[in-house]
Image (cartoon, helix red, strand yellow):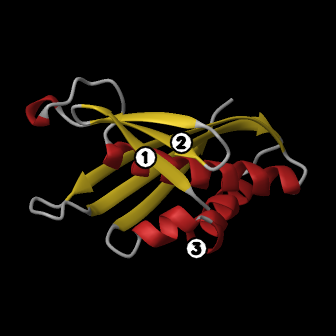
């Protein structure tokens, strides 16, 4: 996997993935940023949420369950001193679809957390990660 991060100006960067997709990242105003993109640590949290959401939907659909929506809400806490790593992350899934059960969704969330989500497992080396879910009709 490869990526390219290029300075646009000040502390704004354009990230380009190996597949050609772009993300703008910008620093906070107190460090010269102009709010033209997400903060780099925000993109890390977003990436974890995307990775886990992909897993949950994929696992449920593989079990032939009709998932119509999945929203992951993440809340993170960072260390007070440098390096300001994530120390706590909570992921809450809101899943909609046909025939979903607490058992099926709970198992999908557990498999993502413990086996499949590379981002969660990696961030779990520094952060206490917790999960919850609800089935939304």
Q: Answer left or right for 96 relative to 26.
A: right
**1 or 3: mark nearer the eye:** 1
> Please, which residue is most extreme toward the right here?
64
Percent position of residue 137, x then y: 69, 29
User: On screen, 89 above or below 92?
Assistant: below
Question: Observer-nearest residue: 118 or 36?
Answer: 36
Residue 16 falls left or right of residue 58: left
Q: Residue 89: x, y in percent?
A: 36, 57
Q: Are marks 1 and 3 in contact (CB under 8 Å)?
A: no
Q: Quadrant of residue 67?
A: top right
- Using the image, determine if residue 51 lies above or below residue 118: above
Q: Label 1 crowding class (10 Å Cα cut-off): few <14, some 14-19, many 20+?
A: some
The one nearer the camera, 10 or 117, is 10
**Mark 3 or mark 2, which is nearer to you?**
2
Which mark is drawn over residue 5?
1
- Name which quarter of the figure residue 40 lies in: top left
Please tell me whether mark 1 sits on a helix, a strand or a loop.
strand
Rendered residue at 38%/76% (across/down):
125
Tags 1 and 2 touching, CB below 8 Å: yes
Residue 26: x, y in percent? 29, 34
Nearest the eye: 103 or 70? 70
Q: Residues within 10 Å of mark 2 (few under 14, many from 20)?
A: some
Relative vertical location of residue 93 with respect to residue 8 in this rendering, above or below? below
Q: Position of residue 34 (x, y in %)?
A: 22, 23
Please report whichever mark, 1 or 3, sits nearer to the chain's N-terminal start.
Answer: 1
- Residue on which disc 3 sits: 114
Label 1 vs label 2: CA separation? 6 Å
Report how far apart the C-alphas of labels 3 and 2 lie in the structure.
Answer: 29 Å
> What residue is pinned by disc 2?
16
């Amino acid at each position: 996997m490869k990526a390219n991060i290029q300075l646009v100006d000040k502390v704004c960067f354009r990230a380009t993935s190996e597949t050609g997709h772009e993300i703008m990242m910008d620093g906070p105003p107190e460090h010269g940023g102009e709010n033209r993109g997400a903060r780099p640590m925000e993109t890390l949290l977003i990436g974890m949420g995307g990775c886990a959401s992909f897993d949950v939907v994929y696992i449920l659909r593989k079990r032939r369950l009709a998932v119509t929506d999945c929203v992951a809400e993440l809340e993170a806490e960072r260390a007070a001193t440098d390096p300001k790593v994530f120390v706590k992350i909570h992921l809450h899934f809101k899943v909609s679809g046909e025939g979903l059960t607490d058992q099926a969704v709970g198992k999908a969330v557990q498999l993502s957390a413990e086996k499949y989500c590379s981002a969660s497992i990696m961030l779990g080396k520094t952060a206490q990660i917790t999960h919850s879910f609800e089935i939304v009709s």
